[in-house]
């Protein structure tokens, strides 16, 4: 594992820890009986009994497609005695789109492009040869696609040497992400954090690869180590949580494409 990848993994783990700590407080009891989707056209709202659903910052949760609104409503319906935020990934992402992306798009795009500056796909092992070959066959086509998609060249590094990406490439990457809406950026930012890559989320958003393929590409080293050294139950549980978050973000992207 390269030093840069190790730093990115530490950032992702810290974000996961903060999220976990935030929700390890006693969960609130379910306070409503019925959940409704309200509206005749976008934006759609969610009503819990008589009250409109709000974000943590007290903005009305307004959703751009009926498909997303139905999925968010279903998350609230399936809560039983308590409300479990970890069981509501689409709600959390929608809250983030309104509370943390709207009005801060430049910052969010910058955060995504920071992963592009040290993209996972650009850091290659120099041994063993079988793993080097696996990285090349899996990542080279995706990197080539990314370069064509944004119109910029990425520098690839082997071993522990850092790869400084051209400023023109990072600007082109930022321009490509600027076309996405607030809800898309909320999902893509999560995917970039979880994969340590700005290319993989873009490839999913553009239909180049499936979310599962992107996740597998982001976890080549973990899968390789498991084959070599066996499974670590704690690491597997952590990876499973992160995988669920990644796939939920990809699901939100899909729901935004539906009416």
Image (spheres, rainbow, N blue to C red):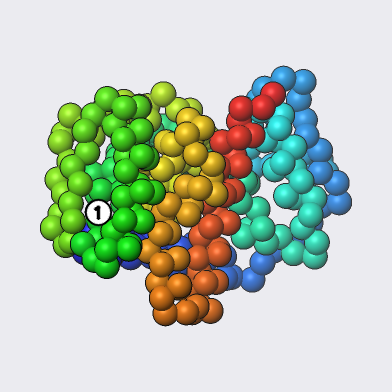
Q: Position of residue 9 (x, y in %)?
A: 34, 62
Q: Quadrant of the C terminus?
A: top right
Residue at which label 1 appears: 123
**Front position in the image: 222 or 173:** 222
Answer with the quarter of the image where residue 178 lies.
Answer: top left
Callout 1 crowding tier (Cα within 10 Å): few <14, some 14–19, many ≥20: many
Q: Is residue 145 above or below residue 13?
A: above
Instruction: Please count the marks in the image.
Output: 1
Residue for point 16% across, 62% down: 160
Q: Is residue 133 above or below residue 48?
A: below
Q: Residue 168 vs residue 150: left or right?
A: left
The furthest residue to the top: 41
**Front position in the image: 120 or 50:** 120
Q: Position of residue 143 (x, y in %)?
A: 32, 39
Q: Position of residue 249 (x, y in %)?
A: 55, 45
Q: Quadrant of the N terminus?
A: bottom left
Answer with the quarter of the image where residue 167 lies.
Answer: top left
Q: Residue 70 vs residue 149: left or right?
A: right
Residue for point 18% across, 42% down: 155
Q: Position of residue 229 (x, y in %)?
A: 42, 79
Residue for point 50% across, 65% down: 239
The answer to whether residue 68 of the structure is visible from this angle is yes
**Front position in the image: 84 or 184:** 184
Residue for point 55% across, 64% down: 240
Q: Secondary structure at mark 1?
A: strand
The furthest residue to the right: 33
The answer to whether residue 5 of the structure is visible from this angle is no
Q: Is residue 139 above or below residue 236?
A: above
């Amino acid at each position: 594992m390269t030093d840069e990848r190790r730093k990115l993994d530490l950032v992702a783990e810290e974000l996961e820890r903060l999220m976990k700590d935030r929700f390890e407080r006693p969960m609130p009891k379910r306070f409503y009986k019925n959940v409704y989707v309200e509206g005749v056209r976008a934006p759609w709202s969610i009503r819990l009994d008589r009250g409109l659903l709000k974000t943590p910052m007290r903005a009305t949760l307004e959703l751009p497609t009926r498909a997303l609104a139905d999925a968010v409503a279903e998350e609230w319906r399936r809560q039983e005695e308590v409300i479990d935020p970890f069981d509501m990934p689409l709600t959390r992402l929608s809250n983030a789109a309104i509370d943390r992306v709207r009005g801060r798009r430049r910052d969010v795009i910058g955060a995504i492009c920071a992963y592009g500056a040290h993209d996972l796909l650009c850091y290659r092992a120099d041994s063993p040869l079988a793993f080097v070959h696996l990285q090349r066959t899996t990542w080279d086509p995706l990197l080539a696609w990314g370069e064509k998609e944004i119109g910029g060249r990425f520098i690839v590094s082997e071993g522990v040497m850092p790869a400084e990406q051209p400023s023109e490439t990072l600007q082109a990457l930022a321009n490509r992400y600027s076309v996405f809406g607030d809800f898309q950026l909320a999902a893509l930012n999560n995917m970039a954090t979880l994969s340590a890559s700005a290319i993989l989320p873009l490839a999913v958003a553009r239909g180049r690869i499936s979310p599962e393929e992107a996740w597998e590409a982001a976890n080549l080293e973990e899968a390789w180590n498991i084959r070599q050294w066996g499974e670590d139950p704690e690491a597997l549980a952590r990876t499973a949580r992160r995988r669920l978050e990644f796939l939920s973000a990809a699901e939100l992207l899909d729901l935004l494409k539906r009416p």
